[in-house]
Amino acid sequence: MSQPPNQPPQGGFGAPQDQPPTGGANPPQDPRSQGGFGAPQGVPQGASQDPRPQGTPPDTPPAPQGTPPPPAGPPQPTPPAGAPQPGYGYPQQPGPYTQPGPYGQPQQPGPYGQPGPYGYGQQQPGYGYPSQAPYPGAPGTPPPGGPGGGSKNPFKGRPALVIAAAVAGLLVVGGTVWAVTSGGDDGKKPVAKESPSQSPKESASDDPVNPGDGSGDGGEDEENLNAGRKAGEAKVLWYKSAPDAPGSGADAPGLWVTDKAAVKAAYKQLFAFDVGDGKPAWDALTFPQKICAVTPQKTADDKVVIAYMSGSSSSAKCNQLQQIDLNTGAKGWTGKVEDGALFDSAISIDLAISGDTLTVGRSMSGTGYDVSSGKKLWDKEKYGASCYPAGFAGGSKLVAVSSCGAGSDTEHDEVQELDPATGKAKWTTKIPKGWRVERAYSVDPVVIYMTNEKKKTVNVTTLKDNGDLRSQLKSDDGFAPECGFAILSRDLTGCFGAVADTDTLYLPTDEKTGANQIVAFDLATGKEKWRVKSPVDAAMMPLKMDGTNLIAYVEASYDGGGRIVSVPTTGGSHTLTKLLQNPQGTANIENGFYSKAVDYVDGRFYISTTRLTGNDEAKEKLMLAYGK
């Protein structure tokens, strides 16, 4: 249903008060040691299998084949005030929510006034239901990854416009629900969309490499991006245009930086650029079909695994695996991901690396492989009361989220920490009914972000090392990490801007205009410890930890380049120290990465796109590197 102008729904943390989650060892599950991967697999033949969302009962009728790919293009303009607003999977009602929360306590109006799923504390607004959103391209949904700038909401100051394909979810700010996207207009001047490759040639000795095709230094630069650089500003080390993509757009997932190379996937190719000068670190690799999944993590010896489609038809699966050495481009083992039981399809998969184990998640199960050899180690399948694995999060720990009892009165999620070597659960935590685990802000410690569709509330919970409840966030702010969207998987680790260390979680506040803040939360209590404000009228996003210092990225604004800052997290002072100031002359390019992956390594800052629009009018941006 549509909402009255300027009266979007309110809400925050809250959920029915059932029993707190309990951690405990899961019954042992015997791993299935089978043969490893062999030669590259061809396109599978025969009838296709129909995917289904996690937890769908086995007797559910098959769904239509071929989920349409996310269309590419810029976000659509906001409708005028009073126009009907598209929904996001459920009718939205205006006004505060005063119905009982998930644990029997009444909910209070405002963003964080409601009790959470574990019965105490104020809760925090956040995303929403990206995994349950309408399919990309549905009426009223703008496509992801279009050109634009910044990471703010393009629909600010308007009634809630909840959109699936470009939406990371919902944020409740001052009682108002806002759509959170990975880019858009944040009160800044419009960002020019012209490609720098169309600018006149200017000569300079420090002109960065820009071949125009993403493949290396294969042509003359068309523009000196360092012209007019001011004292104290970083230098553009190199800039890369993206390869051509189909008109429907294409994914450009991943960003990995080693001592030698910055490596980026785009459509069917994998590119590697020398970290210092941008010249090809090795010849670009081209895959038979489009890249459909990558490991966000790399191994200790700089290996990753890339998945690409088995074909180009609507029945093709994301099931072809290839290990790659990031430093040399050498191809390691190859393999094919087999479908599981009925409805357990590999049409969409997620990949994660934990220690020496690669985990491949299908729609209703997962499999562990030795990441060095491709040998199969174990299967994670249905267990307990109809619990189906729905997503995996890798890193220093391996965390699995399962959907249990779908369609029954006992429907709920469960969170487990798995032993990467065996796949056995070290502990299992039952999430109260009505709550869905959408994201893992951290796996060590485990910090999960949950939503409650019925109550239109959200919750951030931290678990102890044994799976028991540690704390829930308490705040009056709305927060806006940038998260991707997922259709058939939960993409648990697909958020930028949420960082945790042993004792603290750092989140960026959401502001309608101007500077935001980074808030540090004590994971032992869920309460705020301190906060620091962005130094300019642009969003500041937590990026990573560097010892006891938090590294943050301050996004470019219309009148200045972005910057990298360091924030001390201990002691009484949290004064920002500027590590890198990007030049004003390339602010419009930097701010034009609508959907982005970034990293700061060895004094260099890298920003890259994660989505190609397929626009043939100008060369698209792929990657930009700054340094001193």
Image: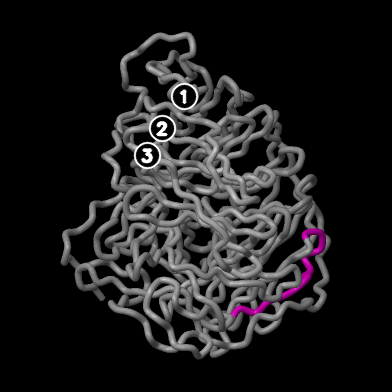
Left or right: 368 in relation to 85: right
- Residue appearing at x 48%, y 9% in the figure: 205
Q: Which mark is residue 233?
A: 1
Q: Quadrant of residue 128?
A: bottom left
Measured in 3D between alpha carbons, the distance from the residue under mark 1 to the one under mark 2, in whole angstroms, is 9 Å
* Tag 3 and tag 2, C-beta contact below 8 Å: no
Measured in 3D between alpha carbons, the distance from the residue under mark 3 to the one under mark 1, in whole angstroms, is 33 Å
- For disc 3, the marked residue is 614
Horizontal and vertical percent position of residue 239:
47, 25
Q: Nearer the viewer, residue 574 or 241?
A: 574
Q: Earlier in the sequence, mark 3 or mark 1?
A: 1
Where 567 falls versus 104 (above or below)? above
Can residue 129 be seen in the rendering of this structure?
no
Q: Badge 1, how many Cα within 10 Å: few under 14, some, many 20+?
A: some
Q: Within the magenta stretch, is there residue 425?
A: yes
Can residue 11 be seen in the rendering of this structure?
yes
Report the residue that reaches farthest toward the front: 572
Q: Within the magenta stretch, is there residue 615?
A: no
- Residue range highlighted in magenta: 420-431
Mark 2 is on which residue type?
Answer: Gly
Q: Nearer the viewer, residue 365 or 51?
A: 365
- Residue appearing at x 32%, y 20% in the figure: 199
- For disc 2, the marked residue is 561
